[in-house]
Amino acid sequence: MPQLIDPKSYVKTLPFPAVHLLGTGEGDLVQPLDLEFRWKLKGPETGFLFSVYEMVLPPEKKGPLHIHPFSEFFYVLEGRLDVMSLDAEGALK
């Protein structure tokens, strides 16, 4: 029979700070380029592995074409989001 691990002792060994929960509309507000973001987790809180923010886009609202030196993903709860990217030759897709 496999040995069971007590989850409480396992979690204590992880080098991460305690988890905090922020609800809809909670978090630090940032308003760049006429857009609104609510930071849920910032880079320093995750050892700069990732960050999380909440953004509500009204219908037909567009963000400017831009690039990042890091990966980005979107999780759409309602509606549809069109995303553009550049291929290896620099053409817009």
Image (cartoon, rainbow, N blue to C red):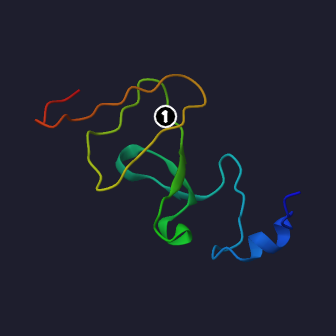
Tell whether 15 sits left or right of 91: right
What count of labels does the image hold? Answer: 1
- Image coordinates of residue 89 in percent, x first then y, are 10, 35
Q: Quadrant of the N terminus?
A: bottom right
Q: Image quadrant for the C terminus? A: top left
Camera-side residue of 35 and 44: 44
Looking at this rendering, what residue extends furthest in the front direction?
1
For residue 68, side relative to residue 17 (left or right): left
Question: Looking at numbered disc 1 in the image, what kind of residue is underneath it?
Answer: Leu
Secondary structure, mark 1, is loop
In the foreground, 14 or 86: 14
Instruction: From this view, report whether residue 65 is shown above or below residue 32.
Output: above
Percent x, y of residue 2: 84, 59
Residue 6 to residue 66: above or below = below
For mark 1, does the 10 Å Cα neighbourhood hold few (<14), some (14 to 19), or many (20 or more) residues?
A: some
Residue visible at 52% across and 64% down?
A: 42
Q: Nearer the viewer, residue 5 or 61?
A: 5
Name the residue tied to disc 1.
57
Residue 28 image point, x, y percent: 57, 61
Above or below residue 78? Residue 47 is: below
Query: Looking at the rendering, which quadrant does residue 70 occupy?
Result: bottom left
Give percent across and percent down for residue 62: 36, 32
For the point 71% across and 77% down, the residue is 13
| Direction left: furthest residue | 89
